[in-house]
Amino acid sequence: MMLKAELRKKYTQKRKALSDDEAFLLSQKIFENFIQYFNPKEGDKVHIFIPISARKEIDTQIFIQYFLAQNIRVYVPKIVADQLINIEIFKDTVFETNSWGISEPVSNEDSVENYFHYVITPLLYCDRKGNRVGYGKGFYDGLFQSISPETKKIGVNYFDPDEYVDDVWENDIPLDYLVTPAEVLSFLSGLE
């Protein structure tokens, strides 16, 4: 058992230790496992984060390019006035880099969509119960509270869930799945 702060520090260091090539190859495996397991279809709605390359996040551009090519609807998060909004993007969407170095759509038009087939979630760590350790801002817990309960909440991570998160709070919403380069874990206890 480890505290979120300890896990955040440990997995930030492990991620930094990856070479760019390693991170890309692991991202590719995560993408392949996601597609093979979930098999998203034309017209499905996917909410997915844009990676922060300076933090060596999973390269979700692989996912986004595939989704757009398959006519899968893509929504990305954007923080506007300390609120996370959901913006639908298209092949011709214009992006800019914000003050945190995150690429995001220029538009601030919230789609007000709350039904997604999948929400692919950034994280630093996820344990074998679906407890997610993010950057500590709580944006995704808020998003999870506002979306349809049928939405599959999916974390993506380079690393296997070896430790348990000790300090889980009652407002923390667990993930339904974790996709790693090696496997897809379900936390739904046979409720699929």
Image (cartoon, helix red, strand yellow):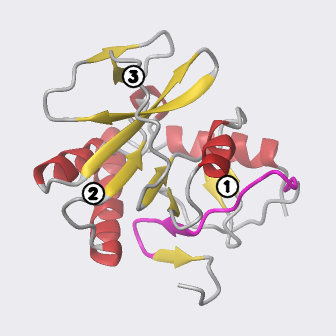
Asked if the magenta segment contains residue 176, the reply would be yes
- Magenta span main SS: loop
Local crowd size for mark 1, using a 10 Å CA cut-off: few (<14), some (14–19), many (≥20): many
Residue 166 coordinates in the image, percent (x, y): 87, 59
| In-front residue for pair 52/154 | 154
Amino acid carrying label 1: it is: Arg
**For residue 187, above or below residue 62:** below
Q: Which residues are magenta?
A: 168-183
Task: Give the residue pinned by disc 3.
Answer: 109
- In the image shown, does 29 or 148 lie closer to the viewer? 148
Label total for image: 3
State which quarter of the image contains the N terminus: bottom right
Amino acid type of the residue that numbered disc 3 sits on in the rendered structure: Glu
Residue sitting at the far top? 99
Mark 3 or mark 1, which has the lower sequence index?
Answer: 3
Q: Residue furthest front?
A: 112
Characterize the local packing of mark 3: few (<14), some (14-19) or many (20 or more) Cα atoms within 10 angstroms: few
Image location (x, y in percent) of residue 60? 33, 45
Query: How crowded is the residue under tag 2: few (<14 C-alpha within 10 Å), some, or many (20+)?
Result: some
Q: Residue at x 60, y 44 (%)?
A: 143
Q: Earlier in the sequence, mark 2 or mark 3?
A: 2
| Residue nearest the observer in this picture, 85 or 130 | 85
Residue position for label 1: 132
Using the image, tell me which numbered label, if any, was put on residue 28: 2
Numbered mark located on residue 172 in the image:
none
State the CA–CA distance, disc 2 to disc 3. 31 Å
Height in image: 148 above or below 188?
A: above
* 53 relative to 127 in the view: left or right: left
